[in-house]
Amino acid sequence: MTIKKRLNAAVIVACLGSLPSLAFSASNAELEAQVKQLQRDLAEMKALMRDIKTSQVTKKEVAVMKKQVESVKKTQLEEKNAASQVHLAGYAQFNYTANDRTYYDDGVKKKKYNEFSNSTFSPIFHYQYKDLLMFESEMSMTINELGETDTEVEYMTADLLINDNMTFLVGKFLSPIGQFRQNIHPGWINKLPTAPSGFGHDQAAPIANVGAQLRGGFYLADTQFNYATYVGNGPKLGGSHDGGGIAIEANGSTSNDNNELTYGGRIGILPVDGLEIGLSAATGKAALTYFDTVENIERTEKNRDYDVLGADFVYNFKKFQARGEYISQELGSLRTSEVDPSSNKWSSWYVQGAYKFSPSKWESVLRYSDYDAPGNLVDQEQWSLGLNYLFANNIIGKIAYDFNDGTKNTLSDEDKITLQMTYGF
């Protein structure tokens, strides 16, 4: 029997037991006093019942809450002690380009029409094992001019997390020379929809390396430094894309035609708040592989010197950002070369300023870049003027106009306007 039922029974028994004396032996005054006392006793019993009922509900609620707390604690403990974690990031960009001027390609008159171009989706996968090892890879999927899908691994590394100041990684990684390629090139980070002249594929800036890298940061005398040093395969050399004798392709390859490795890196210093200055260098050997049409065989010319130099800076002050970079790749001469015995140098530099209008979501950008190549046909000076609208920090709409000055009657001399929608996730 429950507490409530037992109390109700006690009240009934007490009332029934009192009725005979109330009816036969009590005076009116006594009867009235006994009734009032019974009413007081009944009120106290009802109050006791309410307290008991409330106490029982509270205990149930507390029990439920305890179970919920234990469940949350268990989940947090499982997440904290999880050996493996998986994360997906990346970015995408979609361009529209208007350039309808006439130009010449190998003497053939052509016309570049307005077009939707550069539709790219680049997911980045991260897999981490405890605080020891992380695997990361970026896959770039692009629709080409034929409507087909080109898939490329931008980078793929295994990172050993040695300590808070040092990470060792091996695989294919974005070149640590300079800033643009390793940190700025994704569409939602680059403040313009195009790369500076000379910072595209097979131009002045190395794109990627296959090898091993050690990178991190440290403090020295209250000054912050960051560093990256690497060893990897040398670049691939081939026939020129611009009418010269040799083309350089520093895109990261698992073969090393010269059988000698390239060594290099970058050191960055942050002397004051908002300012970073970096210096980069690399050296090694490169080999030229070409097809001998006379003997109908493939030949390889080895032992060309390969040197890279770079310098960069970025400065942030409130809503204003300024950055700039210089990069060059140089191949030494080779007297015995049957293709091009002379030395060759590709160099480019740019300066850029950007300002965010507060409290609006508009941002203006101005950039100047200058690219020099051995063949001269792709040399270009470029002024780029852009206006961005930030739907969010990672969702940006851009419009930019490139004023290009290059070799007459070539695409490098044609101005163009580019619209871009890009987002990062």
Image (cartoon, rainbow, N blue to C red):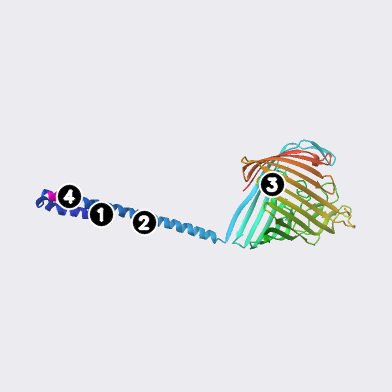
10 Å crowding of disc 4: few (<14), some (14-19), many (20+): some
CA distance separating discs 2 and 1:
20 Å
Which is more N-terminal, label 2 or label 3? 2
Q: Residue at x 75, y 38 (%)?
A: 416
Which is more N-terminal, label 1 or label 2? 1
| Foreground tag (1 vs 3) | 3
Q: Which residue is mark 3?
A: 321
Residue segment shown in magenta: 29-37
| Foreground tag (1 vs 4) | 4
Expressed as whole percent of the image width and height from the top left, the position of residue 115 reads 72, 38
Of residue 147 and residue 419, the one placed in the foreground of this image is: 419
CA distance separating discs 3 and 2:
60 Å
Q: Quadrant of the N terminus?
A: bottom left
In the depicted structure, whether residue 152 falls above or below residue 104: below
Q: Which residue is mark 2?
A: 59
Expressed as whole percent of the image width and height from the top left, the position of residue 405 reads 81, 41
| Foreground tag (3 vs 2) | 3
Secondary structure at badge 1 equals helix
Side of 72 where 92 appears, left or right? right
Amino acid type indicated by mark 3: Gln
Side of 306 where 400 appears, left or right? left
In the depicted structure, whether residue 178 falls above or below residue 423: below
Secondary structure at badge 4 equals helix
Which is more N-terminal, label 4 or label 1? 1
10 Å crowding of disc 1: few (<14), some (14-19), many (20+): few
Q: Which residue is mark 1?
A: 5
| Foreground tag (2 vs 4) | 4
Of residue 12 and residue 297, the one placed in the foreground of this image is: 12
CA distance separating discs 1 and 3:
78 Å
2 and 4 marks in contact (CB < 8 Å):
no
Expressed as whole percent of the image width and height from the top left, the position of residue 425 reads 62, 48
